[in-house]
Image: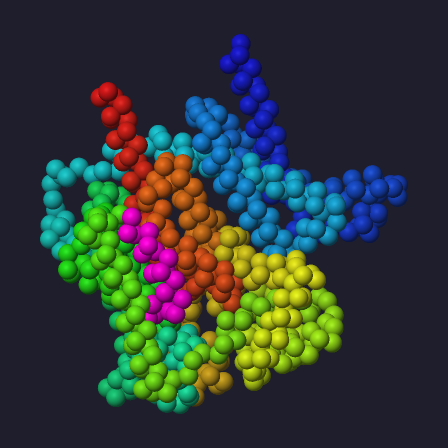
Amino acid sequence: MKEKFDIYKYRIIYFIEAFFTALAFSSANRIITNEEAISIAVYNNPICINLAKFSINYLNGYGVNISIIFLLVFFFFYQIFRKYENLGEKRLQITSSITALLFATFMTIGNSFLYNVDIFISKFQIFITMINFIGYFFLFKNIFIFLISLLKTKEISSLEENEKDKLSFIKKIYIKKPVLFTMLLFFICWIPYIIIFYPGTMNTDSVFQISQYLGSISWSTHHPVFLTIIYGSLMKLGRFLVNDNFGLFLNNILQVLVATFLLSYAINYIYKLTKSKKIAFFLFIFFAFFPTWPIHFYTEVKDVWFSLSFLLFIIMSLKFYKSNGEFTKKEWLIYFISMSLVYLCRKNGVYTIVLTFPFLTVFAKKKEKFKIIICSVLSIILCLIFIKTYMQAFNIEDGNIKEALSIPLHQTAYYYNNYDLNEEEAEAISKVIKLEDLKQAFVPESVDFVKACSESVETSDEELKEYLIVWFKMFFKHPMIYVKATLNSTYGYIYPNRVEYKDGIAQYSIDASGAFQYTNPSNLNLHFYESTEIARNILQRFAYMLRNMPFIGLLFSCGLYNWILIALTIIMIYFKKTRELVLLIPLYTILLVCIASPVNSYVRYMLPIMLSLPFLLSFIINDILKSKNLLTSNEIKN
């Protein structure tokens, strides 16, 4: 009798949860005004008006589509109850609730900024927001429970491959030279891009870097000096041998070759760890055929070299973890190179090294702890010496200090566009940036425009100090404005529904929007061939078509990868894999850098996480399954 009562109880519970989830998906993406409500309310009293507002807000709740969503969600929730026996487990309830709270918050914040809906504008809007939050909470809580139940019931044997199968000729070649064989397959898959987009695509930042190297403009550390040398040297060589196009091609084809090698090496290493051909196959398919990868690796932009260096660092960190720090001399050298490249290819890459190596010492045996410290510190010191020496030798200027003030400047612009400034505030701010520029250049989701305007104003150290004092005082007058400004330029990194804000899903051009007429001081003669124009457009349109497809399109989303990262962290905590959490620290450093970056939802800033997360995800999930099966086997023996 009690079992039957529980079934009916949970049916009612899941009916209510599914109903709230359906409400969250059918809520209006705008603020419902009193005027709209009064126009349909029979009586002009608060109850009638609020009922009218409520009905208008859920106009999307009428119809077949949302009803089908409700039924599917209810069925999904109830199936979890039927198949999962330990719903009352305290550890599961805590971790699933934390996950749901985080993701429901991300969805609420993201919807608010995407649709420009102030959730605190009225009591009614707060009420609607709470209903939506509850719906998202129930959805994500049950999804997390479903994932945990899936991992608990999945058999590792289904992932392992029978090694006694007869080997075909191709398999024999693969076994003999797995990395080279995989490289060849990658190259075959990507060769249409290499031919059609010859000499490769290019970001505008790279034009500045090449021009610095060629002496057309003064050098600066705004962009990595190391990559400026690479871009400039290859362009100079290409010019000498053939033309500018060939100079661009030399860098881009080198990136492709390095990418095919690192991906092949990483896939084969993960295969050795997991013994799963399915995992290796899916990793290959993702990187070989998902269109964002070939075009990114064929683009001259600093984030590509940084992402490849970051992937090498991640794989070496994983090897360090698996070997308890017992590296050969060759492996220590590769690890050192990976750390150095992470720093040299992006200035903030140093945070990745500094925040990771102290935790890596935990895995190492006593004599190896000293080595990882020396390796990390030495890589940073030598990179600093290289940069400083090169800067002095060629009189390279430090980047503009206002680069570090991009977030405060954006918050100031947000403040000025919402509130009036007093005399003291206006005077201090005008010494850093022109007030008219603060209005005209303000873009809620990008700091770049305000930052660019500020660089045209000469500012002394004393004036900067005055500005920062005023900026600090303004925070206490309207603190929520600063919070809104920061979230508006970063929410896309925690909200998968925000499509890429700048430059699209990838760079499909050399001269983006005719930028060369303004930013080509070296008169670089770079161009695609007219004969490949149709093919280029087809490949670009195909990628954007996929971006708009259900589920597949999410693979282009910055927010999705960070959601996976956060969910994976909590899953590891649930399965008590806290020791392995150190492997995710480098990815969190990139996430923090993205949040502090000048542009919202920028795909190229997310490349390091997008590139390395699939490998860590494969290893960690497989490790969880192996540990679970090992525990089950020990329980059976005992």
Q: Give the range drawn in magenta.
A: 343-362
Which quadrant: the C terminus? top left
Q: In this view, does 59 lie to the left or right of 65?
A: right
Residue 394, image quadrant: bottom left
Is residue 110 inside the magenta stretch?
no
Main secondary-structure element of the magenta-colored stretch: helix
- Front-most of residues 602 and 87: 87
Question: How far from the left and from the top, in percent, is residue 506?
Answer: 42, 65
Position of 353 relative to 386 (above/below): above
Question: How far from the left and from the top, in percent, is residue 440?
Answer: 65, 76
Residue at image point 37% right, 87% down: 395
Position of 541 relative to 251 (above/below): above
Position of 198 relative to 523 (above/below): above
Is residue 356 inside the magenta stretch?
yes
Position of 4 relative to 254 (above/below): above
Could one spot residue 199 in this view of the protein? no
Question: How far from the left and from the top, in percent, is residue 311?
Answer: 31, 59
Question: How far from the left and from the top, in percent, is residue 2?
Answer: 53, 12
- Front-most of residues 321 and 21: 321
- Front-most of residues 44 and 607: 607
Residue at image point 24% right, 49% down: 364
The residue at the far top in this view is: 1
Figure disc tally: 0
Could one spot residue 222 in this view of the protein? yes
